[in-house]
Amino acid sequence: MRTLVHGRFPTRATAGLRPSASRLLAVLSLSFLLTGLLAAPAWAADYSAQPRANWLPNGRVLAIAHTGDRVVIAGEFTTLRHSATGETVGRQRVALLDAASGDLIRTWSPAVNGAVQVLAVGNGRVYLGGDFTTVAGQTRTRLAAVDLATGNVVGGWTPAANSTVRGLAVIGDTLYAGGAFTQVAGQNRTRLAAVDLGSGALRAWNPGANNTIMAMAAAPDGGSVIVGGQFRTLGGATRLFLGSVGLNGTVTGWAPPPSCDLPSNQCWVLDLAADADNVYAAIAGVGGRLAAYRLSNGSRRWERTADGDVESVAVRGSYVYAAGHFCPDFSGFQRCDFVAVDAGTGAVDTDFAPTANGQVFALHAGPDALRAGGGYGQLNGVSRPNYTEFPLLPASGDVTLVPAGSSWRYLDDGSDQGTAWRAAGFDDSGWPQGAAQFGFGDGDERQQVAPGRITYYFRTSFGVAATFGQVTMSVIRDDGAVVYLNGTEIWRDNLPTGTITAASRAVSTISGAAESQWTDVPLSPGQLQQGQNTITVEIHQDRPDSSDISFDLRLRAR
C-alpha cells in the first residue's frame, strides 16, 4: 500500500508577507468578473470549509501523514490543546491521532529535540526527516524511524545526514531522502540518498543535485522518484527545479518547463503530489503558482498564479487542494491561503474557500478529511492555530435529481416539433418511452433510436422538495445539444447561435472518446422550482447520414 505524505517548511526571506489588499482591489474587482470560465462546476470539492474540533499545536505543523486509522502530525510544537475541551498535553514535535475521532493516542510520545520537516510511512513505521539530533533520548541525526504501534524508536536504524532532510518517499523496500545534506551514513550523497526501509543501510542510489531538494513523491507506477526544489541540475542533467530519477539512479527524460527562471525570486518547487495522469507542483517565485504537468511527457497541462507562494498541494479524485501564503488573490478569485481546483483544467472551485491568517505548509487529502498544518493563528476568523481538519462532506447531503440511465419520453421520427414540446405542460404521452443511454451505432446504447435524422427530442420530469446550494448537470451528447429547464434554455453546445429549428445541424462532428464523455455544467440553484420540474433536450447531428448518436443526462444537487 502506498501512502501519500505531505510536509513543507518556510523557505523564503519573504515568507509570511502579503501584498496590500488595497493595491490589488481594482485588479481583483475586474478579474473576479472575467474569470468565470476558470471557475469549476458547483459540484466540486469533497470537503467542508468548516473545520471539526481537533488538537491544536502551540507551534508550526510542517508535515502530516495518514496511514490506516492513524494520523501523524509533526513540526515545531511542544504542546497540544484541544479546541473543544481546552485540555493541554505535552508533545515534542510529533504526535499520533486517531483518524476517525481525532483523539490523541496518549501512549505514543517519542520526543524529538528539533524540527521535523517531513514524514513518510511504511513497514509499520513512520519515518522522520528534519533538523533534529535525538528522538526519545536516542541519537538520531536528521533521519529516524519510529514504530507506529508503540512509539518506540527503531533500534539500529541510524543513517545520519549531515544537514537538513526536507523530502521523503517510500517505494518498495526503499526510503528515498532529499534535502540540503551532502553526506548520509558517512558517505557522500549530494542532496539525494536512498536507504533500506528495514535496516537503514545506505543504498548505492546516488544521482545528486546541485541545490536543495524540497519535495519528493513516488511516481504512481513505482518506477521513479519525482523531485522538486531549488536545483538546476539533477544527476548531471539540466532540470530546472523539477525532474525525476529512476530506481537505478539515472535521471529520466521527464523534464517539465519551469514556471519562471529569473535572477532572483525564482520559481522553486516547494511541494509535490501525483495521480495516475499528472504531477501537481506548489511553486514559489513571482506571485507563486500551482501547476499540473503530464506524467507522460512533462508538458504543462495548466498553471494558475497567486499573489504569494503556493507551499503545499494534495490531490484526491478529480480535485487538487493547495495552500500557502497567498491572499487575497488566486487566479482572479478571492482566496486566502486555501484553494481547490479541478485536476483536469485547474478551474477554481467556487465554494471551497476557508481562510487562514498565516502560512500553510502541509496538506493531506484523505478519505475522511482534508488535513492542513502550518504557522497560522486563526482559521475562518476564529482562533484555531497551526492544525486543521476539514471533514469530508456527508454523502447524505448529495441528491441525484435525475440519475444517469433515467427513463425519458423521446421522439425519433424526423418530425419538426417547433417549440411547444419544450414546455412543462406539453402532452408527451404519445411519445415512446425508454431508458438512457439513447443512440445507435456505438454499441453502448440501452435504447436504440432511428438513424438518418437531424434532430431527436427527449423529455423527463423530476421533483424538488428542498433548497440546494449547488446544482450540476452532466450531459453525454453526440453531436450537438440544447437543454431546456421548465421551458427555458439553460445550455447549448456545438450548435449555432440564434434560433434552433429541426433542420439546424451541429457545428462539428463529435467522434472517438468524446462521444461517451460526460460534460459537467454548473447551474444556478435558483433555476430549479419547488415541486415538479421538466427537462427537455434536443440532440442534433451534423449530417443525416451520421454513423451514430449518443445521449444521456444526469442532474445532481447538494
Image: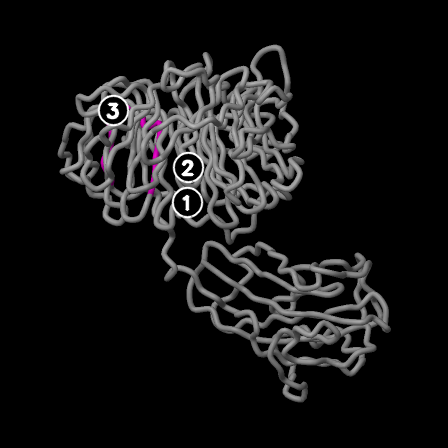
- Position of 441 with respect to 362 (left or right) is right
Is 479 positioned to the left or the right of 96 in the image? right
**Badge 3 density bin: few <14, some 14–19, many ≥20, Cα 10 Å:** many
Question: On the image, numbered disc 1 is attached to which residue?
Answer: 2
Residue 207 position (above or below residue 174): above
From the top left corner, tell me how far across and down residue 297 is, in percent.
66, 38
Q: Position of residue 31 (x, y in %)?
A: 61, 33
Instruction: Give amino acid for label 1.
Output: Arg
81 or 270, nearer to the observer = 270
What residue is drawn where x is 52% and y is 15%?
211
Magenta stretch, residue numbers? 54-66
In front: mark 1 or mark 3? 1
Q: Is residue 65 magenta?
A: yes
Q: Position of residue 189 (x, y in %)?
A: 46, 18
At a point 52% along the width and 73% down the height, the residue shown is 462
| Residue 355 appears in view | no
Q: Quadrant of residue 406?
A: bottom right
Tell me the residue that label 2 is attached to.
170
**Residue tagged by mark 3?**
77
Which residue sits at x=59%, y=28%? Answer: 251
Q: Is residue 265 visible?
A: yes
Mark 2 in CB contact with mark 1 (< 8 angstroms): yes
